Image (spheres, rainbow, N blue to C red):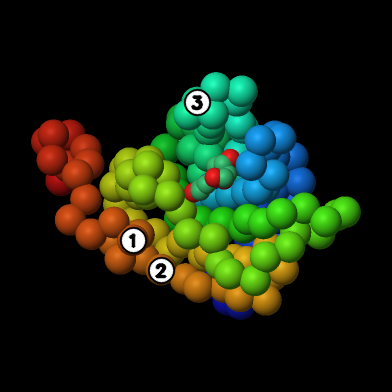
Amino acid sequence: MSEETIDALIDAARDAASRAYAPYSGFHVGAALLLKDGSVVTGANVENASYGLTLCAETAAIAKIANEGWIGELAEVAIVGGRPDGDALIGSDPVNPCGRCRQILNEAAERSKTDILVHCASGDGNAVKSYRLSELLPAAFGPKDLGLID
Ligand code: THU
């Protein structure tokens, strides 16, 4: 994937973060999923007064593609997070996906038969670190362990 395409995916994640519902943490996260056909589906975190019920951005985005029947179409992911300052996000460190989101991304990655790239970007956009999902979640448990796919 070219630098420009990665930047476009990060921009889509940043746009999604602007729609985060995060009144408790004040930390806005956006996730952008690139599908094999080139389309992009996004999600943002959705918090809850019962804090532990919070939905992460990646989870919200994966739920969207699963509900459209596209769980086996995932190609790459970008994640951006930070604290809002007007239209911008503050934060100089790339945001890493939480453990639960790694597992949820793995479900779609295995179904897509792709060791997806996950681009983690800082709120200020100056730092990006890219990983294979297998680096973030080695020896994953997934649908292949249940004999559902090869
Ligand atoms: N968050 C995400 O949306 N994705 C992650 O992978 C890490 C954390 C959200 C959850 C919560 O709303 C806020 O970031 C602070 O933890």
Choose top left, top right, bottom left or bottom right for residue 100.
top left
Marks 2 and 3, Cα distance to the nearest angstrom? Answer: 27 Å
Q: Is residue 109 above or below residue 62?
A: below
Q: Is mark 3 within 8 Å of ligand 1?
A: no
Residue nearer the viewer, 71 or 96: 96
Q: Is residue 26 above or below residue 97?
A: above
Mark 3 and mark 1 lie on one chain; the one further toward the N terminus is: 3
Q: Which residue is mark 1?
A: 136
Q: Position of residue 125 (x, y in %)?
A: 69, 70
Q: Position of residue 135 (x, y in %)?
A: 30, 66
Q: Is residue 37 visible?
A: no
Mark 3 residue element? helix
The residue that appears at 13% across and 40% down in the rendered structure is 145
Marks 1 and 2, Cα distance to the nearest angstrom? Answer: 7 Å
Q: Which residue is mark 2?
A: 131
Mark 2 residue element? strand
Q: Are marks 3 and 1 in contact (CB under 8 Å)?
A: no
Q: Are marks 2 and 3 in contact (CB under 8 Å)?
A: no
